[in-house]
Image (cartoon, coloured by chain):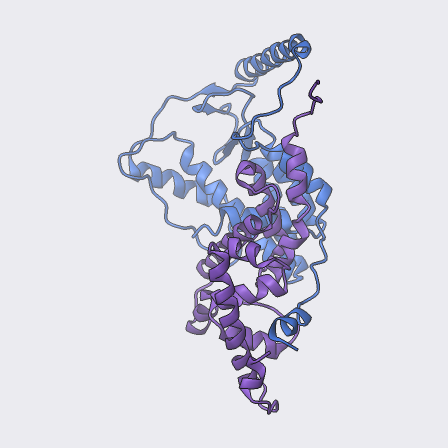
Chain colours: A blue, B purple
Amino acid sequence: MNELELIRQMKTSDVDLTLDPHALFTRIVAGPGDPGLEAPRRSRRRRPGMIAVAVALGVAVTAGTAFGFGILGWHTDNSILKSPREWRALYRTATHELTLPPGEHWPHRTLAPNTVTSRNEPGGMAVGISQVSWECYWVGRIRAHDVPGEKRAQAALADIVRHHIVVAPPGSPENVAPPASVKPPFEIYASDGGLQFDKRTYAQAAAGNPAGIAQSCRANGPVS
Amino acid sequence: MRTPRTTPETPEARFGRVFDHLEAVANYAARRGSDDPEGIAAETMAIAWRRLSSVPDREPRPWLFVTARNLLMAERRAAGRQTPLRPERADALAEPPVESSDPVVTAALMQLAPADREALTLIAWDDLTTAQAAATLGISPVAFRVRLHRARRRLARALADHRPTDRRPVAELESR
């Protein structure tokens, strides 16, 4: 037997896919594709319909933004944070309101030199760090079959989603800020389905499929 | 004569042919020691969708394997950052491992240089042709054939080292 044949025979068995390929395909193609690929040209007859849809969408977005800004209390915040010391103080305060998995410590963060940011940014960063840390911890607990640890991570992430993530109205500007009733720290998500995606990922993890949070952990963590 | 009208292919249809290799990518990652081969495969496909114009339409596997290998290396680097490294763990993290069903074969493969190991496993495990494997490694087919030939000889030697009961001379193993 030659060497290649020997290796071929010692190949481990194929991976038994637990993820749903159809759902994965749908999720991937729902995201932004390659701008280098031009979409097929459509018939001219569809143009009036498309214009109507675009107008309706524009009205909906404008109305949604106006509703969010007028009624719900969302507003633009033009205050600027430029002192690293003040940035660190806000970050430190935020860390007292959030949790990290057992054995982890808050990483040092500060405002980069010659940089300005909004006053909500340090708290938002702390929320993101807490979120990713718990996601990575959850992946490890699922793989270790540590059910209490899994529950702890699930509860921590549910708390973050419920109390520390807010979704800005559609079409909001970069300097958007939530109503004063929203207690910091919080992370502001765009109205693009990101929060729904997170919730779906956590639901899959709670059902024993860690692929989504493992991907998030790998892409965003570790945070130290 | 009128030219028959053809409907332009949608990106989704083109991506569908790439996505058919999801399982092959997951297997590639699993046999290179990934902690999360499904996650690597899913992320590889997500990247392929975002960069679809750069994925070869006829044979996308080399492109997909290169992307998966980059993600594997990132996974290993992240694992290294997450865990304080002991010296022996640091050595283990430096090179992606391979996993075969025979510890002797695994040990012999791990004794080879990573480039030799990858040349052998791309052919034996991932069923690539020499041209496809060469594309995966970013070298010419001629250079790949030379590398494969040398890798087989080195593997024969490594197997002889790991099988003390196998008394056949190394030359006999090499001559096949």
**Is residue B52 or residue A195 the one in the foreground?**
B52
Q: How many marks are shown on the rendered structure?
A: 0
Q: Give the percent coordinates (x, y) of residue A211.
A: 64, 50
- Image: A8 above or below A88: below
x and y percentages locating residue B24 in the rendered image: 65, 54
Residue B57 left/right relative to A172:
right
Instruction: Quarter of the image for the N terminus of chain B: give it.
Output: top right
Left or right of A20 in this view: B54: left
Q: Is residue A19 visible?
A: yes
Quadrant in which the C terminus of chain B appears: bottom right
Q: Position of residue A95 (x, y in %)?
A: 45, 44
Q: Viewed as shown, does residue A124 lie left or right of A115?
A: right
Q: Where is residue A183 drawn, in percent x and y?
A: 50, 32
The answer to whether residue A134 shows anywhere in this view is no
Q: Residue at x 61, y 71 (%)?
A: A4
The structure residue drawn at horizontal position 66% and vertical position 58%, both measured from the top left corner, is A148
Of residues B21 and A160, the one nearer the viewer is B21
Residue A129 or A50: which is nearer the viewer? Answer: A50
A5 up-or-down from A173: above or below? below
